[in-house]
Amino acid sequence: MATRSQDVRPERPEPGDADIVLTPMRRRHLRGVLRIEHQVYPRPWSLGLYMSELALSSTRVYVVARAGPNVVGYAGLMLVADDAHVTTIAVDPAWHRRHVGTRLLLCLVGQAVARGARQLTLEVRVSNTAAQGMYRRFGFAPAGVRKRYYVDNDEDALVMWAHDVHLGDHAERMARIAAGVAGTTIVEGFE
């Protein structure tokens, strides 16, 4: 694992200068992914865990957001039958408020639907109202609470579900969200 001092830090973009490339996560991206992971999560996933997740390509989708050569965000999805579970989503703090998370979630939803998902689920910290707001825009609704889910501080997780993501109404919602994202989003490497 590389030390942080060796990582290249992305510059904060100017308004309207947030052109992002979304690609499947590969081993070469893991240095950037782990750099962000250690910034945003109190108990970051390990290199080994990411390696094992990437090996499960028939039931997992992992995507990175790049600005130039730099990884500025990433997200993951686990598929089980016609359910898809968002396993992780994170954005470099220097790139917050640039719709990187929105772009990543749009990509995950598209990949989930393309692979036969009819509903999506995720857990989010009860204190993370900003993320909950984004998820609500995507059609997620609260469905329950997992008590003491986060082991770093015993915080509860709000369980959220989005149903019928394969239907036209949800596709229209995704198109409206995508139309509201400034800058260019280029999606490469997905079938």
Image (cartoon, rainbow, N blue to C red):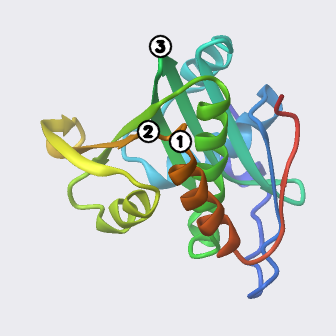
Q: Which quadrant would the C terminus be assigned to in this image?
A: top right
Name the residue located 78 percent from the left edge and 74 percent from the top edge. Answer: 18
Query: Element under label 2?
Result: loop
- Left or right, 191 with respect to 2, comes to right
Name the residue located 47 percent from the left edge and 54 percent from the top edge. Answer: 40
Residue position for label 3: 81
Name the residue located 37 percent from the left edge and 68 percent from the top edge. Answer: 130
Q: Nearer the viewer, mark 3 or mark 1?
A: 1
Residue position for label 1: 167
Report the Cα–Cα distance between label 2 and label 1: 6 Å
Residue position for label 2: 164
Report the Cα–Cα distance between label 2 and label 3: 14 Å
Q: Which quadrant would the N terminus be assigned to in this image?
A: top right
43 to 22, vertically: above or below: above
Query: Where residue 55 sits: x, y (%)?
Result: 68, 11
Residue placed furthest toward the left: 147
User: Amino acid type of disc 3?
Assistant: Ala
Q: Nearer the viewer, mark 2 or mark 3?
A: 2
Query: Where residue 190 sits: x, y (%)?
Result: 82, 33
Query: Element under label 3?
Result: loop
110 to 15, vertically: above or below: above
Quadrant location of residue 99? bottom right
Mark 2 touching mark 1, by CB under 8 A?
A: yes
